Each structure stands twice: as C-alpha cells, then as structure tokens.
Image (cartoon, helix red, strand yellow):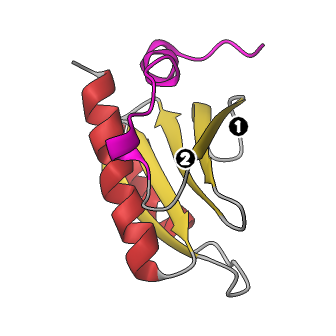
Amino acid sequence: MLALPPPLDKLSNTPVLHSEMPAGFTRVSALTLPADPRYHTLGALRIDFKNASQSESASYALFKSAAQAAAFVPVESNIKTGGFFQIAVARVGRIVIGATGLTHAQASALLRLAIAHLDRSTR
C-alpha cells in the first residue's frame, strides 16, 4: 500500500459520512495515488462514489506550497473530458480538490461535500 503524506493520510482514514455523499450514491471507495513529478504533487487521494448506474469522484492533490497548488487549479479546471463529465475545482491551502459530475451543478455540489469532508478530517 502506498504511504500518503500526513494530511492525505488523515483524510484517507476519515470515514465518509452519508451527509458527505452525493444524493443517490450508496457506495464509496478510495484510491491512493503516488507523487507525480509532472504536476509537482506530493501524493493524491481519489474518493469514488457509485450507485447502480453512475459514478462521481472527488480528488485531493497535495502540493509542497500553496503557490504550487494555486498554479495547478487552472490546469485541473481545463482538463478535456470529451463532454463525458464536468469538473469543479477549489484550492484549500496546499490541497487542490477536483470533483466530477455529469453536470456542472452535480460537480459543484460534490465539490462542496468534498470540502466539508476535508474540513472534518482536519479537526
């Protein structure tokens, strides 16, 4: 298993509450991702939400500095998805959170839930 930096490890070990899941989704799984020198990440965590026919995900990427995280926001915001899903992005300190959904409204709603989950993991 991949060792995550402490902020992501704490997030990974914080269970996702039902109130932090998108409406209509019943299953949660998490995937840890290694550091990526192309984007200067120290590691990442992706949380997938699934139901019988759909999936949405929230990704948390940790950077060495808030400036690096801020520089990455436009990169993630402009990922080409071929119209399959929409992306909403926010930065919280050194962490960039990206959320996907079928519509921009769904991605934005999941982003709010992902920020709440991050906030709860730091208490």
- Secondary structure under tag 1 reads loop
As rendered, which of 59 and 55 lies closer to the eye? 55
Q: Amino acid at mark 2?
A: Ser
Residues at marks 2 and 1, CA–CA distance in whole angstroms = 17 Å
Q: Can you say whether 62 is above or below 83 in the image? A: above
As rendered, which of 68 and 55 lies closer to the eye? 55
Specify whether residue 93 is in view: no
Residue 37 numbered tag: 1
**How far across and how far down the image is residue 101, in percent?**
54, 70
Q: Report which residue position mark 2 lands on.
A: 59
**How far across and how far down the image is residue 79, in percent?**
63, 72
Q: Amino acid at mark 1?
A: Pro
* For residue 38, side relative to residue 27 (left or right): right
The residue under the point 50% across, 82% down is 103
The answer to if 100 sits in the magenta stretch is no
In which quadrant of the rendered view does residue 80 lie? bottom right
Quadrant for the C terminus in the image: top left
Q: Residues within 10 Å of mark 1 (few under 14, many from 20)?
A: few
- Tell me where the magenta segment starts and ends, as one range: 1-21
- Secondary structure under tag 2 reads strand
* For residue 102, side relative to residue 90 (left or right): right
Q: Can you say whether 79 is above or below 35 in the image? A: below
